[in-house]
């Protein structure tokens, strides 16, 4: 009798284990992330608020941070700041773009500072109050160079009239001013954002923009809910890649090397600010 009872108990335990495993396994599907972090550089305290980066060449990246009007040149080989160039007083500086010997820094209110010869001994600073500065409640955070079209691109993070879409504006380097109308609008009702569990106005908040040097695609970074939107040259959405907040605590800067290597900077969060070299696993 005892042997029979033991056998029945063993069978019941086996059946419970099998069915429990089958019920639990779908709860945590194995998902490959949309990216791979290839290399990481922890930044010094001076760049804890790093808000914009731009590739310079020779393993060097130009950086700005929110509060200080300073361009920092960071060397990826030595993992050190090798030089600084002051261009202004304190302010909310959000992006940097570099074309040849000139650097352009975007303040969140739509004012651009041109720093001519910024790596030399006598940099020249010009301040341009753009047309975008007149947009109600504007907060611009993204800036990148588009030298092929002699312009810069600026991305709206938020504004009084940008709850249903986000504008990408042009700063014309011939006019030293921005166009009144956006180059294109990112419609937050687009189906590409359907998987984002947020209210319409919070689905996407551009914090940086970059142009892939080989494909010409626009890469637009959202740091508040980490993700990258990739569009074609007309601004039509192509792909939305979600980033894990444990890897990207506060991403605000994005740049490419001429070879197409992607670098993303993060402000200090649970650890020091950093620059990440990232490979994307695209569809």
Image (cartoon, rainbow, N blue to C red):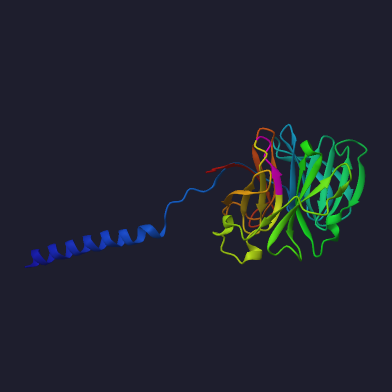
Residue shown at 27%/61% (left/top)? 19
Q: Position of residue 45 (x, y in %)?
A: 74, 51
Residue 39 is one of the magenta-drawn residues: no
Residue 245 visible here: no
- Extreme-left residue of the structure: 1
Residue 118 visible here: yes
Residue 47 relative to residue 187: left or right = right
**Region in magenta:** 209-214
Q: Position of residue 89 (x, y in %)?
A: 89, 54
Residue shown at 85%/37% (left/top)? 119
Residue 211 is one of the magenta-drawn residues: yes
Residue shown at 83%/51% (left/top)? 179
Figure check: 82 above or below 168: above
Q: Position of residue 6 (x, y in %)?
A: 13, 64
Quarter of the image holding residue 166?
Answer: bottom right
How many numbered discs, if any? 0
Quarter holding the N terminus is: bottom left
Quarter of the image holding residue 192?
Answer: bottom right
């Amino acid at each position: 009798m005892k042997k029979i009872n033991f056998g029945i108990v063993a069978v019941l335990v086996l059946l419970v284990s099998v069915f429990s495993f089958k019920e639990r396994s779908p709860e945590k599907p194995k998902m490959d992330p949309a990216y791979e972090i290839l290399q990481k550089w922890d930044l010094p305290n001076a760049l804890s608020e790093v808000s914009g980066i731009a590739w310079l060449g020779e393993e060097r990246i130009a950086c700005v941070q929110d509060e200080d009007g300073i361009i920092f040149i960071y060397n990826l080989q030595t993992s050190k700041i090798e030089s600084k160039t002051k261009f202004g007083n304190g302010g909310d500086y959000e992006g940097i773009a570099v074309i040849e010997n000139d650097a352009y820094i975007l303040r969140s209110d739509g004012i651009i500072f041109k720093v001519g010869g910024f790596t030399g001994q006598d940099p020249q600073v010009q301040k341009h109050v753009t047309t975008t500065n007149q947009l109600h409640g504007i907060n611009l955070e993204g800036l990148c160079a588009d030298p092929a079209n002699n312009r810069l691109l600026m991305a709206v993070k938020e504004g009084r009239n940008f709850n249903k879409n986000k504008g990408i504006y042009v700063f014309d380097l011939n006019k030293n001013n921005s166009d009144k109308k956006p180059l294109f609008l990112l419609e937050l009702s687009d189906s590409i954002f359907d998987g984002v569990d947020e209210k319409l106005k919070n689905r996407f908040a551009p914090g940086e923009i970059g142009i892939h040097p080989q494909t010409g695609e626009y890469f637009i970074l959202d740091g508040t809910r980490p993700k990258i939107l990739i569009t074609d040259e007309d601004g039509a959405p192509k792909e939305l890649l979600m980033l894990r907040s444990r890897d990207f605590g506060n991403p605000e800067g994005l740049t490419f090397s001429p070879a197409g290597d992607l670098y993303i900077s993060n402000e200090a969060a649970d650890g020091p600010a950093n620059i990440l070299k990232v490979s994307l696993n695209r569809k």
